[in-house]
Amino acid sequence: MNRTYPYHGFEVEVGVEAGFHWRKGASMSNYGYIAIVRIIKAGAPLAHFTPLRLGESGGAAFSTEGAAIMGGYSAGRRLVDDLLQGEST
């Protein structure tokens, strides 16, 4: 699943990867989702940042694809806000 959201002159691209994640000392693996976030200036051919792989707080994977998409979008908006705030100072 991939989504692109316009935000303050940037495009926040959010993709989702699914997979198993092993926990140290656990006998079974956990299935979850990781958000892949790219920030691109609208109309630019290259990403503004290196793509980021994000999970829940504490490094755990998201439990659903929807949670990964929304978590990635929220993180992407914060990155753009921080970037714009840095440019205005």
Image (spheres, helix red, strand yellow):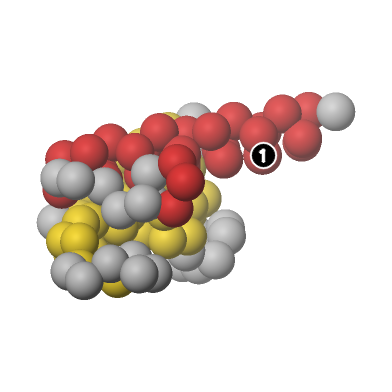
Residue 89 appearing in the image: yes
Q: Is residue 15 above or below residue 66?
A: below
Left or right, residue 19 beside residue 76: left
Left or right, residue 5 beside residue 40: left
Q: Residue at x 35, y 69 (%)?
A: 25
Q: Residue at x 72, y 29 (%)?
A: 85
Q: Quadrant of residue 17?
A: bottom left
Task: Indicate the quadrant containing the C terminus: top left, top right, bottom left or bottom right.
Answer: top right
Q: Quadrant of residue 20?
A: bottom left
Q: Residue at x 47, y 34 (%)?
A: 77
Residue 20 appearing in the image: no
Q: Relative to the observer, which residue lies in front, 18 or 44?
A: 18
Which residue carries the number 1 mark? 83
Question: What is the x, y in percent for residue 30?
Answer: 20, 61
Q: Residue at x 16, y 61 (%)?
A: 31
Task: Indicate the quadrant containing the N terminus: top left, top right, bottom left or bottom right.
Answer: bottom left
Question: What is the x, y in percent for residue 81?
Answer: 59, 30
Number of numbered callouts drawn: 1
Question: What is the x, y in percent for residue 27?
Answer: 21, 71
Q: Relative to the observer, which residue lies in front, 66 or 45?
A: 66
Instruction: Say which element carries label 1.
Output: helix
As shown in the figure, which amino acid type bears the numbered disc 1?
Leu
Q: Is residue 65 above or below residue 88?
A: below
